[in-house]
Image (tube, grey):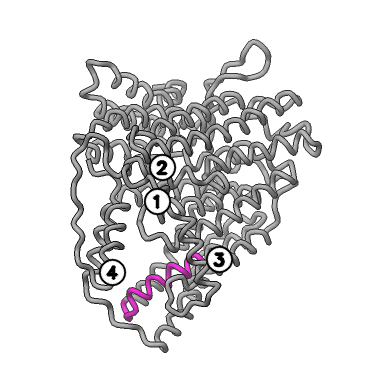
Amino acid sequence: MSAAVLLPAAVLLPATAAAVGLLPRARSAACRLAVAGSALAATAAAALAVVVAVEGPVATARPGVSRDLWVGLVADRLTVTLLVLVCTVSAVVQVFARRHLQGDPAGRRFAARAGFLTAATAAMVTAASLPALALAWSLAGAALVALVGLYRPAPAAREAARRTARMVLYGDAALWTAVVLHLAAGGENDLRLLAADPAPAAGGVTGAVVGCLLVVAAAARCAQLPWHRWLPASLAAPTPVSALLHAGVVNAGGILLIRLHPVVAADWWATWLTVALGTVTAVAATLIMLVRPDVKGALVHSTMAQMAFMLLSCAMGLLAAAVAHLIAHGLFKANLFLGSGSAAHAHVRRLQEPPPAPIGRARAAVLAGLAPAAAALAIILAARLLHPQQQSGAGVLLAFTVVTAAAAAWGWLRRRSTLTGVVLLLVGLPALAGGYLAVLTALTRGLGPALAPAGPAAAPAWTLAAILVLLAAAALLPARSHRRTGLQDRLYASVLAAGQPPLTAAPALRAPGSVPVPTPVPTVPGATPASVRVLATQSEGVHP
């Protein structure tokens, strides 16, 4: 199979399988067709990645009536990497959904709508022209609304579809307005040539408006404040929908800013609007995540915070780091959503076990000092051995990595404070740090030709450092401590209220027409029946 066939096959196979599954004679096999279509698309994307790595970019672009490019697909090192992510996550989710929704009348609807969403997202990440990208963006938004409202006419499903449709409307209006203004100002239409001629009106009012509108479109799709409420509301849909959102849907804003980085990075206002939205969302979503009592609720707010970090990386010109974060987050968070039910049951089992022996103050102080020291040494050692490519803000990014590794090390040591746990930490943490820097270095070098250089308006490194301080303060907030001040009590109550789902969310936990399954409320030491009931219901998704 030639490369010219692999590219459209990877994009169109999910939609083709979904369309065939809608035929009357094929409805009984709709779920199997969806699995087959997504698996073939993932295989085609992987084969295409090998071809691109060996032979170079592949394009099926065709010019329109004029010399401008209007229709076409392109697979370079960046777009084919994103295509593999989209198709792989979709294939895994389709396999999971076939079992998870077995016997549910909504299973066939999910298979079809997920196939259309995957195809639209794949077309968006491989579009060769600006109008084609915007069109695929809008089609993905329409499929997203249909998928989130899978369990209509349940009240929570209607509310989720309404909130998602509003977000899609705002984001699409911003994107299409930016596209029209950019083309009217004589901007380049071919995305492959955008770096050479990013924004003819850069520095003027038109360039600022175009850049800011692109940021608004990206922020809305990434569930950034104030367009964030659609993502928590999407929990009314079954668990596979939440996992599928990480196949280039909720992280589509990062993809948009990466592919259109020359336009956004050419304007100061657009860059600092990205910084402002990302900063506010990162801090607010992190605070809400820390107080959410349910697994999936904490995961969606963690997603919002991580998307904010990805947008901040784009604003600083750290595009390779943004791509690495986009891929890692998509794979990791999709896996967490698919395992959210098991995580809830495991948490209940842990609560039923005898509490661990308390750690003395002296040992706690030693472990608290050991965690950041081990993280810093691991990152420094890995950086010395691998010599990652230097770029603007790389030092602050490494500092952010050290803080993240220190938090993970502290969590490990609190659970395993024995000598064996310390030894495993000292051995495993450098390996993990080296693996992270190796992947980041490989992506920086491998995707270098397909990534635009940092623009003249890239945010300085100290912005990420300031956000690092804010996030560290939020993580250290003693939200669950019994020794809180009045200000901390008010902050805790405000954050907890801000993260609550709509009042209509409870009826959507059961599919319309299905038989309700009573959830036993076990007697858990140290937890009230109400808290266990919230954990068991809100974390399990839909029980057909």
**Residue 476 seen in the current view:** no
Element class at badge 1:
helix
Element class at badge 2:
helix
In the rendered view, does 135 fall on the left or right side of 333? right
Name the residue type under label 1: Phe
Q: Locate residue 222, reporting x and y percent.
A: 52, 44
As drawn, the label of residue 527 is: 4
Residue pointed to by mark 1:
332
Q: Residues within 10 Å of mark 3 (few under 14, many from 20)?
A: few
288 drawn magenta: no
Q: Kindly report the secondary structure that dominates the magenta region of the rendered protein.
A: helix
411 drawn magenta: yes
In the rendered view, does 60 fall on the left or right side of 94? right
- The quadrant the N terminus occupies is top left
**Between marks 1 and 3 in the image, the one whose residue lies nearer the viewer:** 1
Residue pointed to by mark 3:
384
Q: Residues within 10 Å of mark 4 (few under 14, many from 20)?
A: few
The part of the chain drawn in magenta is: 404-420
Q: Locate residue 375, reporting x and y percent.
A: 48, 70
| Front position in the image: 322 or 526 | 526
Q: Are marks 2 and 4 in contact (CB under 8 Å)?
A: no
